[in-house]
Amino acid sequence: MNFSLEGRTYVVMGVANKRSIAWGIARSLHEAGARLIFTYANERFEKPVKDLVSELEGQDALFYECDVTDDDAVNKTFEEIKGDVGTIHGLAHCIAFANKDDLKGEFVDTSRDGYLLAHNISAYSLVAVARAAQPLMTEGGGIVTLTYLGGERVVQNYNVMGVAKASLDASMKYLANDLGKHGVRVNAISAGPIRTLSAKGIGDFNSVLKKIEETSPLRRTVTQEEVGDTAYYLLSDLSRGVTGEIIHVDSGYNILG
Ligand code: NDP
Ligand code: KAL
């Protein structure tokens, strides 16, 4: 079987800069021969994303603005993509957000607004995007989202984002059940900690990385490239029998008691 992505088109949502996990995924898909479509939250990010993508040799990419909290924007984006390319073969959802104040102290202090905001951007967005994208996957396809161990167990400071990731994980499984009959597979990658813009300014991130280096089975942290290659596996026919799954790309840290 040929596992090249030549002739296939994938939407990558959530590139903020060269450190983004979404950028690692974009590079892996590009190397496998895929055509890429990028979405960003607002026009402020158009130029930086376009500048980055210009580094991908021979990539004839398309770009759309898409704030995932806006149903009209999500629907319009996928209608435009349908008009511009017709069929897509998959998408990578690499989007999360919570108020900084909710990512420290105790979870019990999370406000209603903070709770809803985190769930809106980080979990419901997968449902909205999957519903809008599925009709474009006329040849079947794959959807991959990014999650974290803090959705499965309590991790200090992750707080409301952990609860949003638990919702994201369950949403991924329900979507896998709904979309399977259309030949669309839905999976998640649970990445180990990686220094990205989102992680910036978060207290104690260094000690989290150090703990992974000292105690994980592989005794090192993971890279955007390693997550990217697993996304390639999940978005290609290599994983054709896999759906509703969470794959941990975390140096094995999650197996520790
Ligand atoms: P980045 O900061 O690089 O990416 C986060 C992205 O979320 C940004 O591109 C941002 O877009 C996007 N985003 C936020 N709000 C919206 C919105 N309303 N509409 C559309 N896009 C939005 O961080 P990461 O690469 O680390 O994060 C990607 C995913 O990986 C997240 O789901 C995160 O939870 C997950 N993850 C990260 C880990 C890590 O250690 N870094 C570990 C495990 C999971 P913009 O810049 O355009 O605002
Ligand atoms: C236990 C860990 C330590 C860190 C705790 C919480 C991390 C939460 C991730 C969340 C996505 C971060 C934010 O929402 C940051 C946001 O409040 C401020 N940043 C921004 O607005 C920037 C400019 C934009 C680009 O960011 C976003 N997101 O839009 C968790 C660590 C060990 C693992 C991580 C970092 C997991 C994860 O989910 O990212």
Image (cartoon, grey):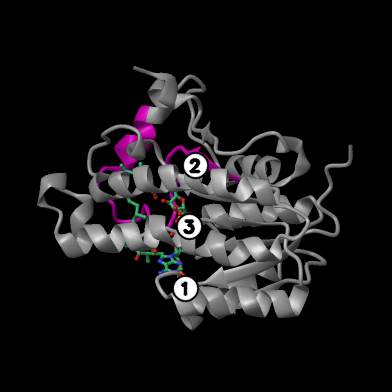
x 42%, y 26%: residue: 254
**Foreground label between 2 and 1:** 2
Q: Which residues are magenta?
A: 185-211
Q: SS at mark 1?
A: loop
Label 1: how many Cα within 10 Å (few below 14, some 14–19, many 20+): some
Q: Position of residue 120 (x, y in %)?
A: 34, 62
If the picture is divided into quarters, which one holds ligand 1?
bottom left
Where is residue 200? Give x, y as percent.
35, 55
In the rendered view of the protein, which quadrant contains the N terminus? top right
Which residue is identified by label 1? 41
Q: With 70 as the anchor, is 111 left or right in this view?
A: left
Labels 2 and 1: the sequence-earlier one: 1
**Residue ID at (55%, 38%):** 244
Label 1 near ligand 1 (CB < 8 Å) = yes
Asked if the residue at label 2 sits under 8 Å from ligand 1, the reply is no
Q: Quadrant of residue 88?
A: bottom right
